[in-house]
Image (cartoon, rainbow, N blue to C red):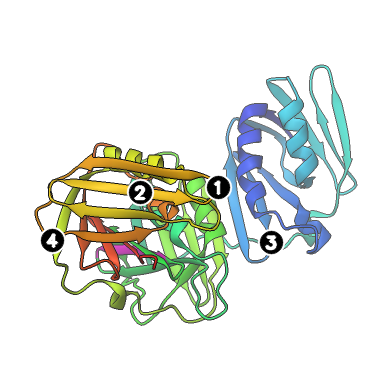
Amino acid sequence: MQAMYHREGLLAAVQLASAAVAPRDVKPILRNLKAIAEPDRCTLMATDLELGIRLEVRGVKVEEPGEAILPAARTLSILREATDEELHLEASTEKCLVRGQYNEFEMPSEDPANFPDVPAFTADRYHELTAGQLRDMIRRTIFAAATENPRYAVTGVLWELEGDQARLIATDGRRLAVDQGTATPFGEHDTKGQTPVVPTKAMSLLERNLSDADEVVRVCFRPNEVLFKTERAMVYSRLVEGRYPAYREVFPKKPTSKVPLSVGPFYSAVRQAAIMTDEESKKVTFGFAKGKLTLQASGAETGRSKVELPIEYEAKAIDIRFDPKYLTDMLRVLDTDAALTLELVDGNSPALFRIGNYSYIVMPLT
């Protein structure tokens, strides 16, 4: 295989594909990338057997079609440090040679036939979503997923695809994020009767590939796996095994008050109050009273804070305590000039934030 690459284009592709490269404790060949050069295109592949990607590399002139194994870490280092605009890559089953105008790097290689295949997207049953909408939905939910939970399958994002509606759901047991958007079904594709949870690592890799807001993304769920197809990438992932909790039961049934908030000022007030929290007392008290919200925090060694924010509030006074991180995680992914509604029951019940089709529930602290 021989090809001439634009360094920056190849660097961007290797950085993206490297997210699916296996860690050191897996099969050695999986610590590499596989390059497939065809007369009119070049594709990079990476997989750890749970997550995989096929990524089209742009700005390539293929001189001799073929396949090659590229050591991921060293290839990435070469592309970061090289100064040439174009690099020539020549590879065989024994070695890989990267050559610029003033430098040359030779690395040992392997037989590309030993690299596991990453499935191609050939489904005729799938949903289509716009990349911009899907990117926003991922950002508004992924942070709420658990990092570990032996009881439920919550270490990822739950997908619900029914008709022309798509929902993404994530929870860690203390908070719940749900976002809904529009989707176009093909071939009667849906997830009814299923609870497919996509690992957060796969969702992060997918989001990084959604750079063009107007492009269309295809989503296909199959038993135990999912495939996402963009214009230049195909992301494959195994699904998280286990049972997902009945998240709809968490929504407050009868809120006693609804508080209109502006994202920007509210976000600023939460950050200010949180300055005086400490490791032992990660909580801010939110005091809702007529015409204002008072946020207070204190720590044995840090001191105390008190921040007042004028709001439209006429209901009975409510004091409720939150971990401020659970609020800032949500607020930072919203537009600062957006209008947000907070639904409250009392100081001990879950609080519900709503904006459009997005819902975010936070459990209070005692």
Bounds of the magenta segment: 164-170
Q: Could you tell me if residue 186 is visible in this image? A: yes
Query: Which of 94/346 is in front?
Result: 346
Which amino acid is tagged 3?
Answer: Asp
Label 1, on which residue? 301
Distance of label 4 from label 1 (alpha carbons)? 33 Å
- In three-dimensional space, the C-alpha distance between marks 3 and 1, rounded to whole angstroms, equals 45 Å
**Residue sitting at the far left:** 314
**Label 4 or label 1, whichever comes before in sequence order:** 1
Q: Quadrant of residue 270?
A: top left
> Residue drawn 39% across and 43% down?
305
Say the numbered circle drawn on residue 48.
3
Spatial distance from mark 4 to mark 2, Cα to Cα?
19 Å
Residue under circle 4?
316
Question: Which quadrant holds residue 15?
Answer: top right
Location of the N terminus (image quadrant): top right
**Residue 296's disc number:** 2
Of labels 2 and 3, earlier in sequence is 3
